[in-house]
Image (tube, grey):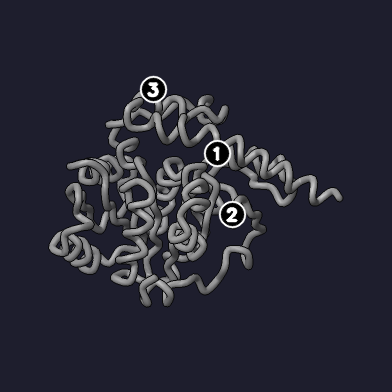
Amino acid sequence: MPAETLEMKHDTPQTDVFDSMTLFGVEFACITEQQSVEWICDRAASGRGAFIVTANLDHLRRCCVEPDYLDLVTNADLVVADGMPLIWASKVQGPPLLPERVAGSSMTVSLCEQAAARGLSMYLLGGDEGVAERAAEVLMRRHPGIQIAGYHCPPFGFEKSEDQMSLIRDGLTAASPDIVLVALGSPKQEKLIREIRSVCPNACWIGVGISLSFITGDVVRAPVWVQRAGIEWLHRLIQEPRRLFRRYVIQGIPWGLRLMAHSAKARLKKTR
Protein backbone atom coordinates (compact mmCIF):
# COMPACT_ATOMS: atom_id res chain seq x y z
CA MET A 1 0.00 0.00 0.00
CA PRO A 2 1.39 3.46 -0.84
CA ALA A 3 2.80 5.48 2.04
CA GLU A 4 0.22 8.22 1.54
CA THR A 5 -2.54 5.67 2.05
CA LEU A 6 -1.12 4.58 5.39
CA GLU A 7 -1.07 8.19 6.52
CA MET A 8 -4.76 8.45 5.63
CA LYS A 9 -5.82 5.62 7.94
CA HIS A 10 -8.82 6.74 9.95
CA ASP A 11 -8.11 8.59 13.18
CA THR A 12 -11.55 7.85 14.63
CA PRO A 13 -12.54 4.21 13.97
CA GLN A 14 -16.21 3.70 13.28
CA THR A 15 -16.37 1.36 16.29
CA ASP A 16 -15.63 4.31 18.58
CA VAL A 17 -18.76 6.05 17.33
CA PHE A 18 -21.21 3.27 16.41
CA ASP A 19 -21.76 -0.37 17.24
CA SER A 20 -20.33 -2.63 14.57
CA MET A 21 -20.57 -6.20 13.40
CA THR A 22 -18.33 -8.36 11.24
CA LEU A 23 -19.31 -10.37 8.17
CA PHE A 24 -16.63 -12.46 6.46
CA GLY A 25 -13.93 -10.39 8.17
CA VAL A 26 -15.37 -7.01 7.11
CA GLU A 27 -16.46 -4.65 9.89
CA PHE A 28 -19.75 -2.87 9.20
CA ALA A 29 -21.13 0.07 11.15
CA CYS A 30 -24.58 -0.62 12.63
CA ILE A 31 -25.96 2.62 11.31
CA THR A 32 -28.94 4.08 9.44
CA GLU A 33 -28.81 6.11 6.25
CA GLN A 34 -29.63 9.30 8.15
CA GLN A 35 -26.87 8.65 10.68
CA SER A 36 -24.44 7.97 7.84
CA VAL A 37 -25.29 11.26 6.12
CA GLU A 38 -24.95 13.23 9.34
CA TRP A 39 -21.61 11.58 10.14
CA ILE A 40 -20.24 12.30 6.65
CA CYS A 41 -21.37 15.93 6.70
CA ASP A 42 -19.94 16.43 10.19
CA ARG A 43 -16.58 15.05 9.06
CA ALA A 44 -16.64 17.19 5.92
CA ALA A 45 -17.61 20.34 7.82
CA SER A 46 -14.86 19.80 10.39
CA GLY A 47 -12.25 19.31 7.66
CA ARG A 48 -11.22 15.90 8.99
CA GLY A 49 -12.31 14.10 5.84
CA ALA A 50 -13.06 10.39 5.48
CA PHE A 51 -13.17 7.43 3.13
CA ILE A 52 -16.60 5.74 3.06
CA VAL A 53 -17.36 2.37 1.46
CA THR A 54 -20.96 1.38 0.69
CA ALA A 55 -20.36 -2.35 0.58
CA ASN A 56 -22.75 -4.86 -0.98
CA LEU A 57 -22.54 -8.62 -1.44
CA ASP A 58 -20.16 -8.26 -4.38
CA HIS A 59 -17.82 -6.07 -2.32
CA LEU A 60 -17.89 -8.71 0.41
CA ARG A 61 -17.13 -11.48 -2.08
CA ARG A 62 -14.23 -9.48 -3.46
CA CYS A 63 -12.86 -8.96 0.05
CA CYS A 64 -12.80 -12.74 0.49
CA VAL A 65 -10.86 -13.45 -2.71
CA GLU A 66 -8.66 -10.35 -3.07
CA PRO A 67 -6.44 -9.58 -0.05
CA ASP A 68 -5.50 -6.16 -1.45
CA TYR A 69 -9.14 -5.16 -1.72
CA LEU A 70 -9.86 -6.41 1.81
CA ASP A 71 -6.97 -4.27 3.04
CA LEU A 72 -8.41 -1.28 1.18
CA VAL A 73 -11.88 -1.70 2.72
CA THR A 74 -10.43 -2.37 6.18
CA ASN A 75 -8.70 1.01 6.02
CA ALA A 76 -11.92 2.87 5.24
CA ASP A 77 -13.23 5.23 7.92
CA LEU A 78 -16.80 3.99 7.56
CA VAL A 79 -18.21 0.85 5.94
CA VAL A 80 -21.99 0.63 5.57
CA ALA A 81 -24.16 -2.24 4.36
CA ASP A 82 -25.50 -1.58 0.87
CA GLY A 83 -27.36 -4.83 0.27
CA MET A 84 -30.31 -6.67 1.78
CA PRO A 85 -28.40 -10.00 1.93
CA LEU A 86 -26.06 -8.31 4.42
CA ILE A 87 -29.01 -7.15 6.53
CA TRP A 88 -30.51 -10.65 6.47
CA ALA A 89 -27.15 -12.17 7.37
CA SER A 90 -26.84 -9.86 10.38
CA LYS A 91 -30.25 -11.05 11.62
CA VAL A 92 -29.20 -14.67 11.20
CA GLN A 93 -25.89 -14.07 12.96
CA GLY A 94 -27.42 -12.16 15.85
CA PRO A 95 -26.72 -8.88 17.67
CA PRO A 96 -25.48 -6.33 17.10
CA LEU A 97 -27.71 -6.01 14.03
CA LEU A 98 -27.41 -3.87 10.93
CA PRO A 99 -30.54 -1.68 11.31
CA GLU A 100 -31.22 -1.05 7.62
CA ARG A 101 -29.75 -1.09 4.15
CA VAL A 102 -27.67 2.02 3.50
CA ALA A 103 -27.77 2.07 -0.29
CA GLY A 104 -25.16 4.28 -1.92
CA SER A 105 -27.73 5.47 -4.46
CA SER A 106 -30.22 6.52 -1.78
CA MET A 107 -27.52 8.02 0.41
CA THR A 108 -26.26 10.09 -2.52
CA VAL A 109 -29.63 11.82 -2.73
CA SER A 110 -29.84 12.35 1.04
CA LEU A 111 -26.26 13.55 1.14
CA CYS A 112 -26.88 16.13 -1.58
CA GLU A 113 -29.89 17.45 0.35
CA GLN A 114 -27.88 17.73 3.57
CA ALA A 115 -24.85 19.22 1.83
CA ALA A 116 -27.02 21.91 0.25
CA ALA A 117 -28.54 22.75 3.63
CA ARG A 118 -25.14 22.97 5.31
CA GLY A 119 -23.28 24.79 2.54
CA LEU A 120 -20.90 21.93 1.79
CA SER A 121 -19.41 21.71 -1.72
CA MET A 122 -19.47 18.55 -3.83
CA TYR A 123 -17.42 17.19 -6.70
CA LEU A 124 -18.84 14.59 -9.11
CA LEU A 125 -16.26 12.24 -10.59
CA GLY A 126 -17.09 9.42 -12.99
CA GLY A 127 -20.06 8.03 -14.85
CA ASP A 128 -20.40 7.62 -18.60
CA GLU A 129 -19.51 10.52 -20.87
CA GLY A 130 -21.53 13.60 -19.96
CA VAL A 131 -23.28 11.99 -16.98
CA ALA A 132 -21.45 13.94 -14.26
CA GLU A 133 -22.23 17.26 -15.95
CA ARG A 134 -25.90 16.40 -16.41
CA ALA A 135 -26.12 15.08 -12.84
CA ALA A 136 -24.72 18.40 -11.62
CA GLU A 137 -27.41 20.26 -13.59
CA VAL A 138 -30.16 18.06 -12.13
CA LEU A 139 -28.86 18.51 -8.58
CA MET A 140 -28.67 22.28 -8.96
CA ARG A 141 -32.28 22.34 -10.14
CA ARG A 142 -33.44 20.14 -7.28
CA HIS A 143 -31.38 21.88 -4.61
CA PRO A 144 -30.91 25.58 -5.49
CA GLY A 145 -28.43 26.08 -2.65
CA ILE A 146 -26.15 23.18 -3.52
CA GLN A 147 -22.52 23.99 -4.29
CA ILE A 148 -21.11 21.87 -7.12
CA ALA A 149 -17.38 22.53 -6.96
CA GLY A 150 -16.76 20.64 -10.19
CA TYR A 151 -17.33 17.47 -12.19
CA HIS A 152 -15.36 15.23 -14.50
CA CYS A 153 -16.04 12.07 -16.53
CA PRO A 154 -12.67 10.44 -17.24
CA PRO A 155 -12.48 8.35 -20.44
CA PHE A 156 -12.25 4.57 -20.49
CA GLY A 157 -8.76 3.42 -19.49
CA PHE A 158 -7.93 6.72 -17.77
CA GLU A 159 -6.20 4.93 -14.90
CA LYS A 160 -3.45 3.80 -17.29
CA SER A 161 -2.74 7.34 -18.49
CA GLU A 162 -0.61 9.62 -16.35
CA ASP A 163 -1.95 12.63 -18.28
CA GLN A 164 -5.53 11.67 -17.43
CA MET A 165 -4.64 11.01 -13.80
CA SER A 166 -2.92 14.39 -13.58
CA LEU A 167 -6.02 16.01 -15.08
CA ILE A 168 -8.16 14.44 -12.34
CA ARG A 169 -5.77 15.49 -9.59
CA ASP A 170 -5.48 19.05 -10.91
CA GLY A 171 -9.26 19.40 -11.19
CA LEU A 172 -9.81 18.22 -7.63
CA THR A 173 -7.02 20.39 -6.26
CA ALA A 174 -8.47 23.48 -7.94
CA ALA A 175 -12.04 22.69 -6.80
CA SER A 176 -11.08 21.79 -3.21
CA PRO A 177 -14.47 20.18 -2.48
CA ASP A 178 -15.84 19.08 0.87
CA ILE A 179 -17.35 15.86 -0.51
CA VAL A 180 -16.25 13.81 -3.54
CA LEU A 181 -18.69 11.34 -5.13
CA VAL A 182 -16.78 8.79 -7.22
CA ALA A 183 -19.04 6.95 -9.65
CA LEU A 184 -16.82 4.40 -11.38
CA GLY A 185 -18.05 1.09 -10.04
CA SER A 186 -16.19 -1.24 -7.71
CA PRO A 187 -13.31 -1.91 -7.29
CA LYS A 188 -12.10 0.85 -9.61
CA GLN A 189 -13.64 3.67 -7.57
CA GLU A 190 -12.20 2.51 -4.25
CA LYS A 191 -8.76 1.96 -5.76
CA LEU A 192 -8.83 5.42 -7.33
CA ILE A 193 -9.82 7.00 -4.01
CA ARG A 194 -6.89 5.29 -2.32
CA GLU A 195 -4.54 6.59 -4.98
CA ILE A 196 -5.63 10.23 -5.16
CA ARG A 197 -7.25 10.97 -1.81
CA SER A 198 -4.16 12.87 -0.68
CA VAL A 199 -4.94 15.74 -3.12
CA CYS A 200 -7.98 16.65 -0.97
CA PRO A 201 -7.24 15.10 2.43
CA ASN A 202 -9.92 17.13 4.21
CA ALA A 203 -12.74 15.93 1.93
CA CYS A 204 -15.07 12.97 2.41
CA TRP A 205 -14.67 10.48 -0.43
CA ILE A 206 -17.46 8.04 -1.30
CA GLY A 207 -17.73 5.41 -4.03
CA VAL A 208 -21.30 5.62 -5.35
CA GLY A 209 -21.32 3.25 -8.34
CA ILE A 210 -24.07 4.00 -10.83
CA SER A 211 -25.77 6.63 -8.65
CA LEU A 212 -25.12 9.56 -11.00
CA SER A 213 -26.90 7.71 -13.81
CA PHE A 214 -29.88 7.21 -11.51
CA ILE A 215 -29.93 10.96 -10.87
CA THR A 216 -29.89 11.79 -14.60
CA GLY A 217 -32.42 9.10 -15.45
CA ASP A 218 -30.05 7.28 -17.83
CA VAL A 219 -30.65 4.20 -15.70
CA VAL A 220 -34.02 3.66 -14.00
CA ARG A 221 -33.88 2.55 -10.39
CA ALA A 222 -36.20 -0.16 -9.10
CA PRO A 223 -39.43 0.82 -7.32
CA VAL A 224 -39.14 1.24 -3.55
CA TRP A 225 -41.03 -1.99 -2.82
CA VAL A 226 -38.55 -3.90 -4.99
CA GLN A 227 -35.65 -2.34 -3.10
CA ARG A 228 -37.18 -3.24 0.26
CA ALA A 229 -37.89 -6.79 -0.88
CA GLY A 230 -34.19 -7.24 -1.61
CA ILE A 231 -34.62 -7.95 -5.33
CA GLU A 232 -33.28 -4.71 -6.77
CA TRP A 233 -30.50 -6.83 -8.26
CA LEU A 234 -33.12 -8.60 -10.41
CA HIS A 235 -34.41 -5.26 -11.69
CA ARG A 236 -30.86 -4.27 -12.64
CA LEU A 237 -30.21 -7.67 -14.22
CA ILE A 238 -33.25 -7.29 -16.48
CA GLN A 239 -31.95 -3.87 -17.60
CA GLU A 240 -28.35 -5.00 -18.24
CA PRO A 241 -28.30 -8.82 -18.52
CA ARG A 242 -25.04 -9.12 -20.43
CA ARG A 243 -23.04 -6.95 -18.07
CA LEU A 244 -24.55 -8.15 -14.80
CA PHE A 245 -25.38 -11.86 -15.30
CA ARG A 246 -22.02 -13.12 -14.06
CA ARG A 247 -21.95 -10.78 -11.06
CA TYR A 248 -25.50 -11.39 -9.89
CA VAL A 249 -26.18 -14.99 -10.90
CA ILE A 250 -22.88 -16.86 -11.32
CA GLN A 251 -21.15 -15.15 -8.40
CA GLY A 252 -23.86 -13.45 -6.36
CA ILE A 253 -26.32 -16.26 -5.64
CA PRO A 254 -23.70 -18.81 -4.45
CA TRP A 255 -21.98 -16.17 -2.32
CA GLY A 256 -25.29 -15.10 -0.83
CA LEU A 257 -25.96 -18.68 0.25
CA ARG A 258 -22.43 -18.99 1.58
CA LEU A 259 -22.89 -15.80 3.60
CA MET A 260 -26.09 -17.10 5.19
CA ALA A 261 -24.41 -20.38 6.09
CA HIS A 262 -21.46 -18.50 7.56
CA SER A 263 -23.78 -16.30 9.66
CA ALA A 264 -25.78 -19.31 10.89
CA LYS A 265 -22.55 -20.97 11.96
CA ALA A 266 -21.49 -17.81 13.79
CA ARG A 267 -24.89 -17.75 15.55
CA LEU A 268 -24.42 -21.33 16.76
CA LYS A 269 -21.00 -20.46 18.19
CA LYS A 270 -22.56 -17.63 20.17
CA THR A 271 -25.19 -19.88 21.71
CA ARG A 272 -22.79 -22.60 22.85
Mark 3 or mark 1, whichever is nearer to me: 1
Q: Is residue 80 left or right of residue 113?
A: right
Badge 1: residue crowd in 10 Å (few <14, some 14–19, many ≥20): some
As measured in the structure, the alpha-carbon distance from the residue carrying label 3 to the one carrying label 2 is 29 Å
Kind of residue at badge 2: Phe
Ranked by sequence position, the earlier of labels 1 and 2 is 2
Q: Label 1 belongs to which residue? A: 255
Q: Is residue 198 above or below residue 164?
A: below
Asked whether 12 or 272 is in front, the reply is: 272
Q: Residue at x 57, y 36 (%)?
A: 256
Q: Residue at x 34, y 35 (%)?
A: 214
From the top left corner, tell me how far across and down residue 2 is, in percent.
36, 73
Q: Is residue 30 above or below residue 257?
A: below
Mark sitting on residue 28:
2
Mark 1 or mark 2, whichever is nearer to me: 1
Q: In the structure shown, which secondary structural element does the residue marked by tag 1 occupy?
A: helix
Residue sticking out furthest to the left: 163
Q: Is residue 123 left or right of residue 38?
A: left
Ranked by sequence position, the earlier of labels 3 and 2 is 2
